[in-house]
Amino acid sequence: MEWRGEGILLTVRRHGESAAIIDVFTEEKGRHAGVVRGGASRKIAPILQPGAQLDVAWRARLEDHIGAFTVDLIRSRAGAAMGGRLALAGLNAVTALLSFCLPEREAHAALYRRTGMLLDLLGQDEIWPLAYLRWELALLEETGFGLDLSVCAVTGADEGLVYVSPRTGRAVSHAGAGDWADRLLPLPPVLRGEGAAEDAEIVAALGVTGYFLGEKLAKTLGERPLPQARARLVEELARRV
Amino acid sequence: MSANRDIDALIDLMARLPGLGPRSARRAVLHLIRKRALLLTPLADLMQSVAATARECLNCGNVCTADICDICRDDRRATGELCVVEDVADLWAMERAGAFRGRYHVLGGTLSALDGVTPDDLRIPRLIDRIATEEVGEVILALNATVDGQTTAHYIADHLQGRVRLTSLAQGVPIGGELDYLDDGTISAALRARKDI
């Protein structure tokens, strides 16, 4: 069994004295783990930094074995990420969420491409938060918890949408909310691609996506809490407000 | 094959040491036995002694044979500079370089969501105590230039901001390094940290 492809390194875990077990996110194979022999060595360890774009070749005797990777660096993103506090928090949040949310060996080609683009924007702090918000919406969509913010779930109107139903993830207008308004989540315009996309609004929007990640998606993954790295990113953004 | 159970057990234990495998452990044990008086006996005595006395310095986390290590006890090193490192091996590396004459603080790891290492697992509260009690003027964050290392550095910086001067090690071209062989991340970091000549 073997394949070769390009992937984004998500996690690295030391294995024994000199090897490492890595998790890469590839276009065709999805999130895929494997052993890198010599992965803890002086030569290879610096390559294996989260976010790195790698050329990987996987080989195993049987399909369900963990198998071994040989890796080659295409592009490191750690340098860009370490240049700034927000970029570093962002890189940690993206890799931690993907590692947390995605099942192994299930392709998510569109999300893979979006992730690559998002990580390539690391260091551009003016546009990165909005790109990250869009990416989280795509992550929810890919994992089956996408938000439908096009029309009001109650009245069908496409204007005056100010709430999101925490149960269905659909938009609700002020008129449609009625007495239920205090049980609904606020809908910041930036979630619908409207408004100025200020940091404060993006933080509020991440509160909504965070609700669905934590209360819906995470609940299906064995009641595990969301990775702390995401909370640290939101804190970092809130600090800029 | 060793003909004695104790010797086999010794080989098995030696083979678990970093850098050794069964073959090299067998060679090392054989060498020790042949140099019994010169190596084996003194080594056994020292290992017994270190096993009984080795512990973490209560102040900085360095490994020593007393409650407080030599570095923390040395008044000449009370320079007001505190170098924060990830691990004892990093402290020893800094000492080998001989370039730093202040004191250290060993965190005992880095924050890692994957391995479940949280701030409570590191010696960060003790670091904050030391800054308050030891008249520290500067904290040098000498953490590894890895994603985990720098994430930890930012976390500590957040907690110490405003209390003390915070610095970190420079990142860039290593001594003897050739640009052609450096990865793009290192070149970017070096360019960002460029200095006037």
Image: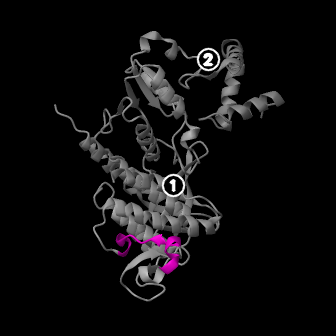
Q: Which residue is mark 1?
A: A11
* Residue A34 placement (x, y as % from top left): 56, 59
Q: Nearer the viewer, residue A23 or A148?
A: A148
| Subunit of label 1 | A
**Secondary structure mainly formed by the magenta segment:** helix
Count the numbered circles shown: 2
Residue B67: image tag: 2
Answer above or below: position of A9 versus B41: below
Which corner quadrant of the image does residue B154 belong to?
Answer: top left
Q: Which residues are magenta?
A: A178-192
Q: Nearer the viewer, residue A183 or B142?
A: A183
Q: Which residue does the image show at 55% across and 36% down from the upper left?
A: B122
Answer above or below: position of A63 versus A71: below
Q: Is residue A6 visible?
A: yes
Answer above or below: position of A50 versus A156: above
Q: Quadrant of the C terminus of chain B?
A: top left
Q: Quadrant of the N terminus of chain B?
A: top right
